[in-house]
Image: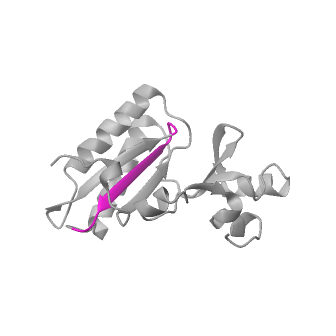
Amino acid sequence: MSLSAFDQLPDAARLWIFGADRALTHPDAQRLLAGIDRFLADWTAHRAHLTAARDWRHDRFLMVGVDETAAGASGCSIDALVHEIQRLEGVLGIKLADRASVTFRRGEEIDSVSRPQFADLAAGGDVNPDTPVFDNTLTTVGELRAGRWEVPARSAWHGRAFFRVGVA
């Protein structure tokens, strides 16, 4: 089965965002994308092929979407995706499935730190509610298209967790 184009997925398509702990070199990105493309081309749930697509942004964010109108991702199929991501992490020596980190912009640079490190940066004033963060907890392609991915910290869970502000 061939992959769909990410921009052809409907807004309701389910989304997973995996952020690498560092920017990937072009050869490493090509290896990652080739591996995930092979996986997605054969990705199934209860023996039904999933209509899936991926996107790659800023040399460090892998986005996987699945159109669940024909067949939905099951627990086992999601586990298979996570296992493939973990396999690729080992091959490339990176972290992609680490949900305990915070990814944000420092000027034009993108940085990724642990939550305690981000809390220290917030306490020291090095980051603030206006700091652009990447909210990798989005669950639909529509949320991504609506501009809810790279937002000021105050507009994502980061605002509540680190600055005690409500989400705008």
Question: Magenta stretch containing residue 77, yes or no?
Answer: no
Looking at the figure, which quarter contains the C terminus?
bottom right
Q: Is residue 69 left or right of residue 95?
A: left
Q: Is residue 112 left or right of residue 116?
A: left
Residue at image position (67%, 37%) is 108
Q: Is residue 22 above or below residue 71?
A: above
How many marks are shown on the rendered structure? 0
Colour mode of the rendering: one colour
> Farthest residue in the right direction?
124
Q: Position of residue 119 (x, y in %)?
A: 75, 58
Residue at image position (33%, 61%) is 10
Q: Position of residue 6 (x, y in %)?
A: 34, 49
Q: Is residue 132 left or right of residue 93?
A: right
The one nearer the camera, 149 or 77, is 149
Residue at image position (67%, 44%) is 105
The one nearer the camera, 9 or 123, is 9
The one nearer the camera, 107 or 62, is 107
The one nearer the camera, 43 or 3, is 3
Q: Is residue 142 above or below residue 121?
A: below
Residue at image position (64%, 53%) is 133
> Farthest residue in the bottom direction?
166
Image: magenta residue range: 58-69
Question: Magenta stretch containing residue 68, yes or no?
Answer: yes
Q: Position of residue 48 (x, y in %)?
A: 15, 63
Q: Position of residue 156 (x, y in %)?
A: 63, 64
Q: Is residue 45 left or right of residue 96?
A: left
